[in-house]
Image (cartoon, rainbow, N blue to C red):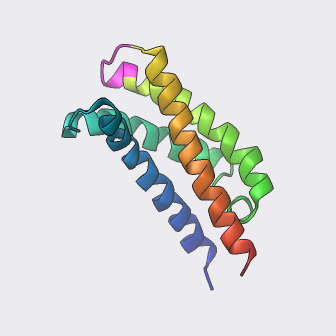
Amino acid sequence: MLTNVRLQAGAWVGDLLLLAAFPFLGAMNHEDPVSIESFTRTVVPFAIAWLVIGVASTSFAAATIHSRTLTLQRVLLALVGSGVVAIAIRVVLFDRPFSLPFAIVAIGATTLLIIVWRISLATLLSKR
């Protein structure tokens, strides 16, 4: 049986792996290699923003992780909000110019990836 702490850690690790995959998906689309610098300036802001806003929004609460409905209600909104914060972090801390197309794709893609993962996780947990 999964404890709440293990469940929450598993959700966070899955989310983080998907955030880490995003630069590689972009690189494949643009046929560019991923450098340590580009990986860091993309993943770090999204990971920090998602952890802070995810915790504050109860997106990592066991009840949310177990529920498809709560996932759609809490996690979806929190991901979009954390994406906006991540773009701001990226612009300010990494001195990157604001790019609306990048912001839309980054927020949309990471949100979609994590929502699909979290809905799948909730579905699997409901069958236990």
Q: Is 44 displayed left or right of 62 in the figure?
A: left
Where is residue 70? Give x, y as percent: 77, 53
Residue placed most toward the observer, 40 or 48: 40
In the picture shown, does residue 7 fall above or below 80?
A: below
Residue 93 covered by magenta stretch: yes
Residue placed most toward the observer, 106 or 1: 106
Q: Residue at x 63, y 65 (%)?
A: 121
User: For the N terminus, which image quadrant?
Assistant: bottom right
Residue 95 covered by magenta stretch: yes
Q: Residue at x 59, y 41 (%)?
A: 53
Residue placed most toward the observer, 61 or 97: 97
Q: Hey, which quadrant is residue 56 in on the image?
A: top right
The answer to whether residue 57 is seen in the rendering is no
The answer to whether residue 32 is seen in the rendering is yes
Q: Is 102 displayed left or right of 52 in the figure?
A: left
Range shown magenta? 91-97
Which residue ends up furthest to the right in the rendered image? 69
In the picture shown, does residue 18 fall above or below 123?
A: above
In the picture shown, does residue 120 fall above or below 5?
A: above
Where is residue 115? Give x, y as percent: 62, 49
Q: Residue at x 69, y 37 (%)?
A: 77
Q: Hey, which quadrant is residue 30 in on the image?
A: top left
In the picture shown, does residue 44 fall above or below 11?
A: above
Where is residue 107? Give x, y as percent: 53, 32
User: For the C terminus, which image quadrant?
Assistant: bottom right
Q: Residue at x 23, y 32 (%)?
A: 32
